[in-house]
Image (cartoon, grey):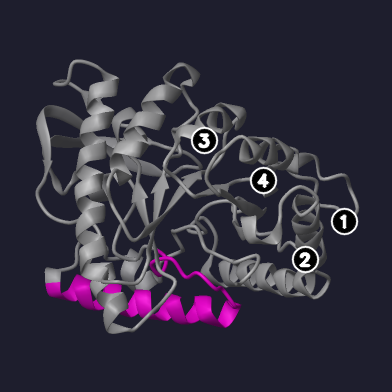
């Protein structure tokens, strides 16, 4: 068994030859550019030492909302709205029953099979976030719309798993909106569970990138059909070595949740901040990992950036991942 598996969360900065013409490529030109960018990014991930390479930095998708909803019936895409850090997405309005027109991520799965890659994790935008970021002009309430999105994602996951074959496929449900409405945590729970209901041969992850209260999430974890919870910590942690790791206080709360959950669950520990170019030295990352190991066993802890690294240059992203893996190797020597 490998301990302290290092993983990337999803997005990575696109090469200029892809990003500069992303929306203007002809179909064949786009496919060639996206394949090239994915292959180059996978190679970069390997050189950094990553164990889990995700889907090569999400080169086939511009951003996490428009990519899936543009492949659905019943949604009309309107203009851009701001999400965070001066990033925008084109918001959609649900005007009728939603259904899937075409797969969201099949191109990536086929490419990875062609490249004979292992340890693949597919990030899929979660049903609650899709609901929260859409106008609802059709369904009776937010809960009904979230469950409708959950059924579509379940269909997507089933097809991806069928295409992948016998090897376990890791599926990461991305839910940045998960804790933004505390009164709706039951909707988060039910819609995420709907997304993975009855699908065998997958390892389920949930990624929540930033929350003012992870306790809201921890309260529903015992009932959630998810095995790995990839969360942000580094963004709120002092950068100096030797400080009490205040930003990691929720690791203890996760341990308490682990103790009342009847299945095995693991924590994906965010150890690098994706909002600044500062390269966390391996010693600082080691401090963060070792703090988490005070509460969690090594087989229940994974190591990752706080979120996707698309906010940083490819060079900075690579160095952050490389330092993360250097720190992991040093911690393993002490176990």
Q: Residues within 10 Å of mark 1 (few under 14, many from 20)?
A: some
Which comes before the other along the chain, label 2 or label 3? 3
Q: Residues within 10 Å of mark 3 (few under 14, many from 20)?
A: many
Q: Secondary structure at mark 2?
A: loop
List x then y, in percent, for residue 195.
Answer: 30, 42
Which comes before the other along the chain, label 3 or label 4? 3
Q: Is residue 39 magenta?
A: yes
Residue 331 can be seen in this image: yes
* 286, above or below 139, in the image: below
Nearer to me, 180 or 79? 180
Tell me the residue that label 3 is attached to.
Answer: 221
> What label does residue 241 carry, if any?
1
CB under 8 Å between discs 4 and 1: no
Q: From the image, state whether disc 1 or disc 3 is nearer to you.
A: 3
Which comes before the other along the chain, label 2 or label 4? 4
Q: Residues within 10 Å of mark 4 (few under 14, many from 20)?
A: many
Q: Secondary structure at mark 4?
A: loop
Tell me the residue that label 2 is attached to.
Answer: 281
Which comes before the other along the chain, label 2 or label 1? 1
> What label does residue 2 carry, if any?
none
Distance between mark 2 and mark 1 Cα atoms:
9 Å
Distance between mark 2 and mark 4 Cα atoms:
16 Å
Distance between mark 2 and mark 3 Cα atoms:
32 Å
In this image, 159 relative to 205: left or right?
Answer: left
| Magenta residues (range) | 28-57
In this image, 122 relative to 270: left or right?
Answer: left
Which comes before the other along the chain, label 1 or label 3? 3
């Amino acid at each position: 068994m490998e301990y302290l598996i290092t993983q990337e969360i999803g997005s990575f900065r696109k090469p200029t030859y892809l990003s500069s013409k992303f929306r203007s490529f002809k179909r064949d030109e786009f496919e060639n550019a996206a394949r090239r960018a994915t292959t180059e990014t996978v190679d970069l991930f390997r050189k950094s030492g990553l164990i889990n390479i995700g889907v090569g930095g999400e080169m086939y998708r511009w951003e996490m909302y428009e990519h899936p909803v543009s492949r659905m019936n019943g949604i009309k895409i309107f203009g851009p709205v701001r999400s965070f850090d001066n990033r925008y997405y084109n918001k959609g309005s649900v005007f009728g029953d939603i259904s899937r027109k075409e797969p969201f991520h099949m191109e990536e799965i086929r490419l990875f099979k062609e490249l004979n890659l292992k340890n693949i994790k597919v990030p899929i935008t979660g049903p609650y976030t899709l609901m929260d970021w859409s106008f609802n002009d059709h369904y009776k309430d937010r809960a009904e719309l979230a469950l409708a999105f959950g059924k579509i994602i379940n269909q997507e996951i089933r097809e991806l798993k069928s295409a992948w074959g016998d090897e376990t496929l890791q599926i990461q449900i991305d839910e940045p909106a998960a804790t933004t409405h505390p009164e709706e945590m039951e909707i988060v729970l039910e819609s995420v569970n709907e997304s993975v209901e009855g699908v065998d041969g997958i390892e389920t992850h949930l990624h929540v990138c930033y929350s003012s209260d992870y306790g809201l999430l921890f309260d529903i974890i015992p009932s959630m059909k998810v095995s790995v919870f990839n969360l942000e910590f580094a963004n709120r942690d002092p950068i100096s070595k030797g400080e009490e790791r205040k930003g990691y206080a929720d690791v203890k709360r996760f341990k308490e949740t682990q103790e009342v959950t009847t299945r095995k669950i693991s924590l994906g520990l965010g150890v690098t901040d994706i909002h600044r170019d500062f390269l966390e030295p391996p010693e600082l990352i080691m401090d963060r990992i070792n703090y988490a190991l005070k509460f969690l066993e090594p087989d229940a802890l994974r190591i990752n950036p706080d979120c996707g690294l698309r906010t940083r240059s490819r060079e900075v992203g690579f160095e952050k991942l490389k330092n993360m893996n250097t720190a992991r190797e040093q911690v393993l020597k002490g176990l």
